[in-house]
């Protein structure tokens, strides 16, 4: 499991990858941000850090589900089956104008041992700066990392002055012939404008402004028809 978190006010960040046993990897990433001199911890070192700071741990079977087991069996039986992705991202703007992003993933079913996805990569799957926006990515991790999509959105907002939604769409289309694959981005800018952009038919997404009713959607047409 991989995770990262970034504070847009200070640009401090914490990231972990190849984590086992830790119940909530995003909590471990936050502990790295708050209590570690380093930004990124991996594997056994990350697990030891979690134990040192009393984070909740679980046995391996806690993370196993029948659905995941069946997906894994299907993948090894059908080599061309599209791997299932499992990423959760969140972006936020508080009342003081501070932006933040958190992204966590269990990776993709059937990935090679040692593979790291985009979620813990700052600028790839996550980025936040009070100067512009906070962005979290989901989709084909290799494509997202090679395109540095989260930082691409930040740069388009900060240096080109694009609205957050337009910046996300431009990042998704970036060098499309070389970076083909599933890409989804959620973002919020320093003025509270929200972006929920994807090149796929399905992306589970939601946002809420203050005490207003939340917006929740799954299918692409729900995004296209949003007023």
Image (cartoon, rainbow, N blue to C red):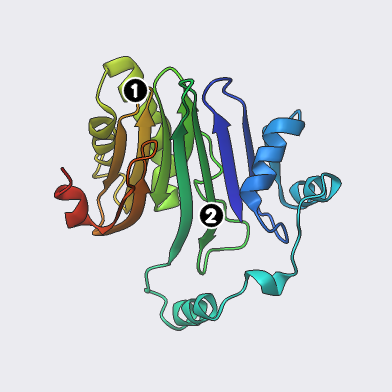
Does dot 2 land on a helix, a strand or a loop?
A: strand
**Quadrant, the C terminus:** top left
Q: Position of residue 30 (x, y in %)?
A: 66, 39
Query: Observer-nearest residue: 97 or 150?
Result: 97
Does dot 1 land on a helix, a strand or a loop?
A: loop
Query: Observer-nearest residue: 27 or 75?
Result: 27
Q: Position of residue 225 (x, y in %)?
A: 14, 50
* Residue 191 circle label: 1
- Disc 2: CA contacts within 10 A as few (<14), some (14-19) or many (>=20): many
The residue lying at 36 percent from left, 37 percent from top is 209
Q: Is residue 217 left or right of residue 60?
A: left
* Residue 105 circle label: 2
- Disc 1: CA contacts within 10 A as few (<14), some (14-19) or many (>=20): few
Q: Is residue 33 left or right of residue 221?
A: right
**Quadrant, the N terminus:** bottom right
Q: Position of residue 86 (x, y in %)?
A: 47, 60
Q: Is 12 drawn above or below residue 83 in the view shown?
A: above
Q: Position of residue 215 (x, y in %)?
A: 30, 48
* Residue 154 circle label: none
The mark that comes first in sequence, 2 or 1, is 2
Query: Observer-nearest residue: 171 or 113?
Result: 171
| Tag 2 near tag 1, CB within 8 Å | no
Q: In front of the other: label 2 or label 1?
A: 1
């Amino acid at each position: 499991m991989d995770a990262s978190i970034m504070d847009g006010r200070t640009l401090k960040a914490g990231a972990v990858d190849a984590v086992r046993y830790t119940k909530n990897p995003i909590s471990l990433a936050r502990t790295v941000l708050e209590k570690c001199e380093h930004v990124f911890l991996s594997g056994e070192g990350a697990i030891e850090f979690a134990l040192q700071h009393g984070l909740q741990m679980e046995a391996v079977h806690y993370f196993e589900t029948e659905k995941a087991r069946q997906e894994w069996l299907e993948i090894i039986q059908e080599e061309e089956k599209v791997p299932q992705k499992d990423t959760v991202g969140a972006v936020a703007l508080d009342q003081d104008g501070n932006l933040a992003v958190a992204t966590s993933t269990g990776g993709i079913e059937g990935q090679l041992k040692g593979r790291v996805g985009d979620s813990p990569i700052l600028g790839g799957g996550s980025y936040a700066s009070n100067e512009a926006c906070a962005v979290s990515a989901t989709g084909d991790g290799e494509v997202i990392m090679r395109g540095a999509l989260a930082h691409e959105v930040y740069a388009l907002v900060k240096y080109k002055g694009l609205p957050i939604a337009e910046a996300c769409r431009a990042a998704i289309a970036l060098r499309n012939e070389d970076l083909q694959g599933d890409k989804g981005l959620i973002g919020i800018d320093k003025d509270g404008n929200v972006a929920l952009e994807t090149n796929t038919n399905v992306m589970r997404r939601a946002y809420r402004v203050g005490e207003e009713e939340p917006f929740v959607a799954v299918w692409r047409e729900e995004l296209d028809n949003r007023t």
